[in-house]
Amino acid sequence: MTLDYSQRFIFEDTDIRGELVHLQHSLQAVMNHHAYPPAVGRLLGEFLAASVLLGSTVKFNGRLVLQVRSEGSIRLLVAECQHDGNIRGIARFSEQLGDESFAQLLSQGTLVITIEPAVGQSYQSLVPLTGVNLAACLEYYFQQSEQLATRIWLAADAQRAGGLLLQQLPRQLVTDAQVRAEQWQHSVILAATTKADELLGLAAGELLQRLYVQDPIRLLALKPISFSCSCSATRTANALLLLGQAEVEAIFAEESVVEMACEFCGQQYQFTEDSLAAIVREGEIPH
């Protein structure tokens, strides 16, 4: 049984599509690199599932990043999904973190959604975190930016994460406004009965059969999801150079070898002054 995937589905004879995502091994790989408290792990799991769902609504070759900086107990949270299904994520949090609500964990935070195509300009959207949970905030984003009716359900525990997205597409198969509204209401009402343990434990086909036993649904090809880090010596060297020439020179005046670790996967990179200069000379790092 595949445990890490996203799968699109279509309600036949309607202009409604959906996406289901389930993360297990990929989520555990993210968690294995950090000792996250349960509250942080659950929220990071939801963000990772959400990044896959949002990526499914965009046709692009590149990556989609959800990032939050806040004044709450979780200072930083990043969830990244590549077009090929690779994910990674990190969180930074306060040691005094307790049993707090979504609003408290991310107090005064703003969600930044960034789409970075491999070719062309990246673009960002800012989403206020004023909803009761991440799903509500993302629904507001779709309402304001995409103007497509969209509903999202998310769930996560220490080992798994899951998500369900429904989206009403522009008129194509159904043009009557009342019929469209009735079809959308029907699909949403049934989806809203989904329980967290069903999102986390049931395969896509089984979950949809339980929700929509009388509705004809077409499942599209399953897309595998996996953990993969895009870090490299070059990118890590670039991060070091961002400190500025004077700061870098001061560091090497005290240490002959500078060691830096990737926050996402823990990979260690070592640089000497000569090796760093060689990377710059080879033109691998943009100025």
Image: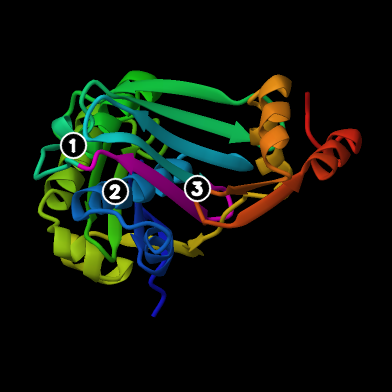
The quadrant where residue 205 appears: bottom left
- Give the SS element for disc 1: loop
Q: Where is residue 212 in the image (x, y as percent from the top left)?
A: 19, 60
Residue shown at 60% from the left, 26% from the top: 122
Between 251 and 141, the residue placed more toward the observer is 251
Dot 2 or dot 3, earlier in sequence: 2
Q: How many marks?
A: 3
Q: What residue type is labelled 3?
A: Glu
Whole-Å distance between the Cαs marked 2 and 3?
19 Å
Write the residue at 58% across / 54% down. Answer: 84
Q: In the drawing, does residue 89 fall left or right of residue 163?
A: right
Q: In this view, does 275 lie above or below 116?
A: below
Is 259 on the left-hand or right-hand side of 115?
right
Would you say 134 lies left or right of 27 here?
A: left
- Residue reaching furthest to the right: 281
Residues under numbered marks 1 and 2 in contact, where contact means CB atoms less than 8 Å apart: yes
Q: Is mark 2 on a helix, strand or loop?
A: helix
**Callout 2 amino acid:** Glu
In this view of the protein, which residue sits in the foreground, 241 or 112?
241
Q: Give the range drawn in magenta.
A: 82-95
Q: Position of residue 149 (x, y in %)?
A: 29, 31
Identify the mark nearer the N-term, 1 or 3.
Answer: 1
Precedes in sequence: disc 1 or disc 2: 2
The residue beneath circle 2 is 46
